[in-house]
């Protein structure tokens, strides 16, 4: 994303930036997908001079309806993604500091089919709304600043709606001591409007976790310890548009039930380390179901 942004800036200085517009829109689509997906963990990530900060709060309504081998669930999620670059100095012109902010909300109905005691097939359809703001700043020549505005590199605000079909398969294996080994694979493809870009964005993910069930008890509550490792990324043309294409997330988390009025919720909290083909960072996990 950074190299396209500054290549376009260079073309504005020398000739015209219009030839790079479509590539930049493709990068914006991937930023939107990054803000929405669970497949790419990016709570705090640094890559190629850009920093990514993502905050996401999911709430899961599991098995709202069950009929034989089929079950219906829904997830609600709020997301915030901030992306910013270090200052880019242009001799005799000025300096540019790039920044984008994305706020989004999604709802995801999901139908799960239980193939057998271990395997299940998941079919999910995510609907969402997002607002992306370009909060980049430029200090320097006024004419250059106006050119940046005309080329949509400064001061814009876009509302976007998206639909993302997702399919996946999950395997759950229980050990004799009641611990669990879970693994999954998932693929998705996002159709979004707002960027006038025909190149939509796909993501994929693979992962596994070891759940130490009822590892210890505190205040009459049983706690599970979860060790997990997952990898995810973009696929398709220009899958490395954001300067990285794949992110691996190794995490450790605790899960415990809490009483909420007449219901019982499960809260999962933890930390993880992110490592990619051109990125690294940390993630904080918070999930309610």
Image: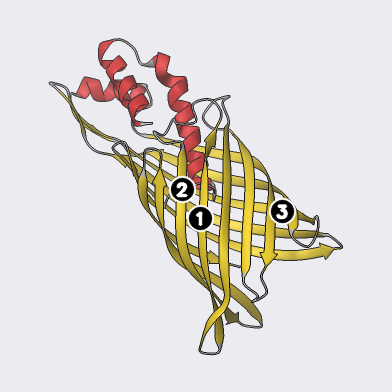
Quadrant in the picture for the C terminus: bottom right
- Dot 1 lies on which element? strand
Residue position for label 2: 248
Q: Name the residue furthest top.
A: 15
Residue position for label 1: 229
Query: Which residue is rendered at x = 75% and y = 65% of the image?
Result: 64
Query: Which residue is rendered at x = 57% and y = 52% of the image?
Result: 207
Query: Which residue is rendered at x = 49% and y = 31% of the image?
Result: 239
Do the residues under discs 1 and 2 have CB atoms within 8 angstroms? yes
Give how far across and how far down residue 232 sits, in percent. 52, 44
Comes first in the chain, label 3 or label 2: 3
Q: CA distance from mark 3 to mark 2?
A: 25 Å
Is residue 47 left or right of 22 when viewed as pictured?
left
- Dot 2 lies on which element? strand
Give how far across and how far down residue 77 sits, in percent. 56, 56
- Dot 3 lies on which element? strand
Q: CA distance from mark 1 to mark 3?
A: 23 Å
Q: Name the residue furthest left.
A: 92
Please name whichever residue, 49 or 217, is drawn nearer the observer in this view of the structure: 217
**Which of the two discs, 1 and 3, sits closer to the camera?**
1
Comes first in the chain, label 1 or label 2: 1
Residue position for label 3: 110
Compared to residue 140, the image places residue 288 above or below, namely below
Please name whichever residue, 175 or 35, is drawn nearer the observer in this view of the structure: 175
Comes first in the chain, label 1 or label 3: 3
Location of residue 204 (image quadrant): top right
Query: Which residue is rendered at x = 45% and y = 22% of the image?
Result: 23
């Amino acid at each position: 994303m950074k190299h396209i942004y500054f290549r376009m800036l260079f073309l504005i200085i020398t000739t015209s930036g219009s030839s790079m517009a479509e590539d930049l829109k493709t990068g914006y689509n991937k930023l939107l997908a990054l803000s929405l997906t669970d497949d790419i963990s990016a709570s705090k990530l640094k890559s190629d001079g850009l920093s990514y900060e993502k905050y996401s709060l999911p709430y899961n309504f599991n098995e709202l309806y069950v009929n034989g081998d089929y079950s219906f669930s829904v997830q609600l999620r709020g997301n915030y993604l901030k992306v910013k670059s270090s200052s880019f100095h242009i001799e005799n012109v000025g300096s540019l500091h790039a920044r984008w902010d994305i706020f989004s909300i999604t709802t995801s109905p999901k139908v799960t089919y239980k193939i057998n005691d271990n395997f299940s097939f998941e079919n999910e359809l995510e609907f969402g709304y997002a607002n992306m703001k370009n909060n980049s700043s430029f200090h320097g020549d006024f004419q250059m600043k106006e050119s940046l505005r005309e080329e949509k590199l400064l001061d814009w605000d876009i509302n976007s709606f998206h639909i993302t079909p997702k399919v996946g398969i999950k395997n759950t294996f229980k050990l004799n001591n009641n611990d669990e080994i879970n693994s999954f694979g998932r693929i998705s493809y996002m159709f979004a409007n707002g960027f006038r870009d025909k190149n939509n964005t796909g993501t994929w993910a693979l992962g596994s976790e070891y759940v130490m069930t009822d590892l210890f008890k505190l205040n009459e509550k049983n706690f599970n310890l979860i060790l997990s490792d997952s990898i995810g990324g973009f696929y398709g043309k220009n899958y490395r548009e954001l300067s990285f294409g794949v992110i691996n997330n190794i995490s450790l988390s605790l899960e415990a039930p809490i009483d909420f009025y007449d219901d019982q919720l499960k809260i999962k909290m933890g930390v993880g380390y992110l490592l990619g083909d051109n990125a690294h960072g940390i993630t904080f996990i918070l999930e309610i179901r």
